[in-house]
Structure formats: C-alpha cells, structure tokens
Amino acid sequence: MVSKESRQEVRVKKHKRLRNRLNGTAERPRLSVFRSNNHMYAQIIDDTVGNTLVSASTLEKSVKAELEKTNNVDAAAYLGTVIAKRAIEKGIKTVIFDRGGFIYHGKIAALAEAAREAGLEF
C-alpha cells in the first residue's frame, strides 16, 4: 500500500526548510503568514529577540467588520493592506516575506501584493 503524507505535514516540512534560510532581524523583520480554512493571520517578527512587532488577522473585529467573508482572496488582500499600514506606523518599511510553506498563489499572493502596494518592501 502507498502511504502518502498529509498536506499539512508536507506544508510543515516546506516551512522548516524555508525557515533555515529566512531570519528576521531588527532592521528587516520577517512577515510571517498563516492561513487556516476560515481565517488568515499575518505577523511581523524580529527573530533576534523573538518578538512580534505587528500582527493582524481576520479574527479582529475591526478587520472582520470590513469583510464579507474571512477566507477568500479579497479578505487576504485587505489583511495585506492592514498589516502594511500598521507596520509603516511602527516605522517598519522593509521585511522578509515568509509564506509559511504555502504555495505563492491565490490568498498568499494576494496578501503579499496588497502589502507591497500599501508600502512594504520585500
């Protein structure tokens, strides 16, 4: 019988490989993205001290109020603009994008493009 790894296990392995190369610093923190079936989460992390500098998710009341659904491409794009605005308010202009083992397509790509358009550089 052929045993096949679950999508979650494959994603986690990819993310571990990515994290070997990506490391956020104080000058250039890491923009980490996670998506579940119902929501999306984005954090800007300084890995040297292990602090989350800025975060946003579709669970927040202010974000959820603007959205019709919390798990589609439009929600991801809105979340990208929110995280970028909050980062710029804190003085963060450049980041390293960590896609979290997800394929750069659909919701992940929409979030990244919206963050770029809102002023983040990566």
Image: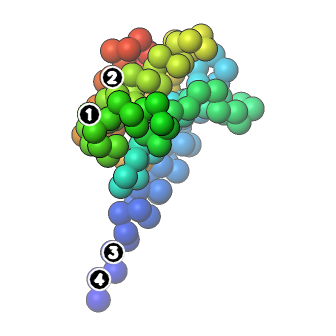
Q: Amino acid at mark 4?
A: Val
Q: Amino acid at mark 1?
A: Asp
- Residue 89: quarter of image: top right
Q: Amino acid at mark 3?
A: Lys
Which residue appears at 70% of the width and 33% of the height?
Answer: 51
Kindly identify which numbered label has been placed on residue 4.
Answer: 3
Q: CA distance from mark 3 to mark 4?
A: 6 Å
**Residue 74 x %, y %:** 26, 34
Query: SS for tag 2?
Result: helix
**Residue 21 x %, y %:** 53, 37
Question: In this figure, which residue is indicated by the disc labeled 4?
Answer: 2
Q: CA distance from mark 1 to mark 3?
A: 32 Å
Is disc 4 in contact with disc 1, using a CB cutoff of under 8 Å? no
**Residue 31 x %, y %:** 50, 30
Question: In this figure, which residue is indicated by the disc labeled 1?
Answer: 74
Which residue appears at 47% of the width and 49% of the height?
Answer: 15
Query: SS for tag 4?
Result: loop
Q: CA distance from mark 1 to mark 2?
A: 10 Å
Q: CA distance from mark 2 to mark 3?
A: 35 Å
Kindly identify which numbered label has been placed on residue 114.
Answer: 2
**Residue 60 x %, y %:** 49, 37
